[in-house]
Image: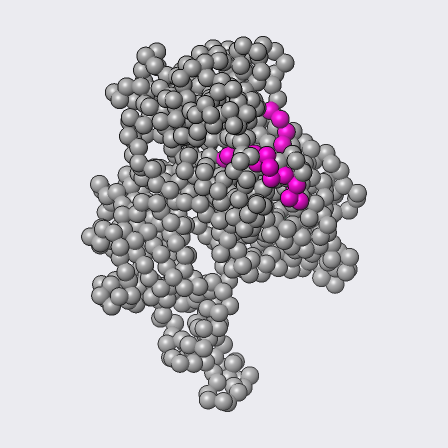
Amino acid sequence: MALNMDAIGKPIGPMKRDYTWKDAVLYALGIGAGFPELDYCYEKNLKVIPSFSIAMIFDFLSQAAIASGVNLAGILHGEQELIFHNPIPPEGTLITTGKIVDYYDKGENKGALIVAESDTVHANGQKLFTNIITIFGRLDGGFGGKDRKKAPVEFPDREPDFVVEASPSPDQPLLYRLSGDIFHLHVDPEFAKMAGFDMPIMHGLCTHGFACRALVASLVPGRPERVRRFACRFSKPLYPGVPIKTLIWKTADDKAVWRTVNAENGQVAIDNGEFEYGDIPKDEIRFDGRVAVVTGAGAGLGRVYALELAKRGAKVVVNDLGGALDGAGGGSSSPADRVVEEIRAAGGEAVANYDSVATADGGEAIVKTAMDAFGTVDILINNAGILRDKSFVKMEPNNWQAVLDVHLKGAYNVTRPAFAVMKEKGYGRIIMTTSAAGLYGNFGQTNYSAAKMGLVGLMNTLKIEGKKYDIKVNTVAPIAASRLTEDVMPPDLFAKSKPEFVSPLVLYLCSDRCPVSGNIYNAGMGFFNRAAVVTGPGKVLAKEDQIPSPEAVMASLKEISTLSGGKVYRDLNAQVGDALMAFQSPAAAASDSDPPGFSSVAAVFEAMPDAFVPEAAAGVEVVFQYVISGDDGGEWNCTIKGGSCTVDAGGHNCPTCTLKMADGDFLKMMNGRLPPMQAYTSGKLKIEGDIMKSQLIEKLFKLN
Ligand code: NAI
């Protein structure tokens, strides 16, 4: 049976798992804890060993294997990575959702790799951990797919800083299996013989648990909640009762590498171990497990985006041609290399790419660099840029074309292959870089302004095409000190405009917390605001079939031009719809007194955090889930807790109440043209869950 290619990107779950302190203690005993680590074994002040997480998601692991179509007779647990976002409480309900991310082909008779990823959230709404599992399918190689090249973990050339010895009992698997992995290989002597072993073998994940205890005891003693990341590759099985040693090398203040060996013969049982630790910042935006491509990242803004993304866990492709300000010259690899070195020196992961964005081949090669090095692309920042300023008559075709090639065509060239990867996996974040010169105009920059406004058009349609696949496309208009601006910016402004003041917005728009798509933001010096194409209400001049005269236009220019009551349209259809409506109700359409209102459903949720009234939220803890149908619809959830409000796109796993409505009705209600009670009694608004809590909404938000 071949691997199921259609399964890539399809959601697996949500899967629900209730657990109590007894499950956490049973797991701790299963991985060798006892009286010396009473904190893990006694319900009084119980602490949960981080690797318990994996025991809580066995269902996901088996569902992923089944969905992939891998030949189950040949599967082995290849690699395991756990990223911890918050400490695991001693009891509760866990909700796990994930997907198969990709397959890799090691070749005929060499096997295949199935990579799956999941996120687990506690019913209290806290995201607890991300799991990235690599299943090795011994019998599935040679399907014609790509291979994965992954650099092995580098171990220091010295004795380990810690060696933790342990002696799993000969009966260890009998206890460990009670935590969920009841595969016969670990209990049934006959089955083990059929599988080619002398007796039942240890669960690889049981040894993994022993290693986790050893790392916590050595690096964060008594503070398992400080573990941030725990990754490894399984190498060789062990028989129960065989003593083991976990060897640990500290490589930075908050990082270590490790392996676990068979203490009798020195064979490595678990290899390529990585361990990261530190305090978990509240509500931190992270990019662990994400792959970002930043074009023109050898200098200026791109360099800062790349460094900041890597600092927060992203693996980064640093693209830069290394050319002159005007794009002339053959280019140089050194700007990109320098940034890669900076990222690596800070403990991050990055690779360089020197291709030009200005050709289709270059764009393909940039994305291929990400695929070869890291296996995917989650984030693309189209940032590369050059300038060739001249007043219009002096703007020869070569200067016009060169600027359009880098900015506009460049974004097309890289975005197209990246978009294909994102569409396949059902996730993506894309940034276009426009400029105030394009949005508002600037003398001597016709080529640049045209290219930069072209990028806004590209975003406008891409946001529509990407919506179904959770691909969000936004545009930033930066102001920053760089070689591009050093000749044109006044020195005091130049000094205040470090690119670091732009990157917070760009990072947020690149994150999975970003709910908006199709927006343009100005960003510079720490000041941020939104820019948009606003369309005024206008006036109908045609009477019946009569074509209006130019003089009629002249006479009505004021009404035609006014932006009072203007709207930001989500797409062409919304604008055409309003134009047609204007004929049905010309008086209303031409009125200056129309309330501006929200023009899209997304705009309502974007405005919600600002409209939140903290005083009305004392003691309130609720999650409102909105399910809005129609072309403009989608899902958003809004969590009120501790006097603050967070709004996220997508479904919440445990909403207090769910409000369902069609997009048009929802906008009418939010724009004050449909009273909520009337919406509810007429059936336009459906509420599931705790209906009483939904009545709080009017008090909690002042939206109009
Ligand atoms: P920068 O010149 O410091 O960085 C641009 C980078 O792009 C350079 O390292 C360059 O080698 C690279 N590059 C140029 N052509 C390339 C190509 N064909 N392929 C790959 N890389 C290429 O400039 P800065 O200021 O950091 O600009 C970044 C982006 O922000 C540009 O798109 C620019 O137009 C835009 N922008 C910047 C503003 C500012 O105030 N700095 C204002 C408005 C927009």
Task: Identify the magenta region.
Answer: 132-153
Residue at image point 61% right, 11% down? 158
Q: Residue lying at the far right in this picture: please name it.
A: 330
Q: Is residue 303 left or right of residue 262?
A: right
Q: Position of residue 296 (x, y in %)?
A: 66, 43
Magenta residues, dominant SS class = loop
Residue at image point 79% right, 44% down? 329
Q: Is 348 rendered above or below residue 319?
A: above
Q: Is 676 rendered above or below residue 248?
A: below
Q: Position of residue 613 (x, y in %)?
A: 28, 48
Residue at image point 33% right, 26% down? 24
Does 137 appear in magenta?
Answer: yes
Does 495 appear in magenta?
Answer: no
| Residue 307 visible in the current orientation | no
Q: Is 544 rendered above or below residue 459?
A: below
Residue at image point 40% right, 17% down? 171
Residue 36 figure quarter: top left
| Residue 454 visible in the current orientation | yes
Q: Position of residue 665 (x, y in %)?
A: 33, 66
Q: Position of residue 411 (x, y in %)?
A: 64, 52
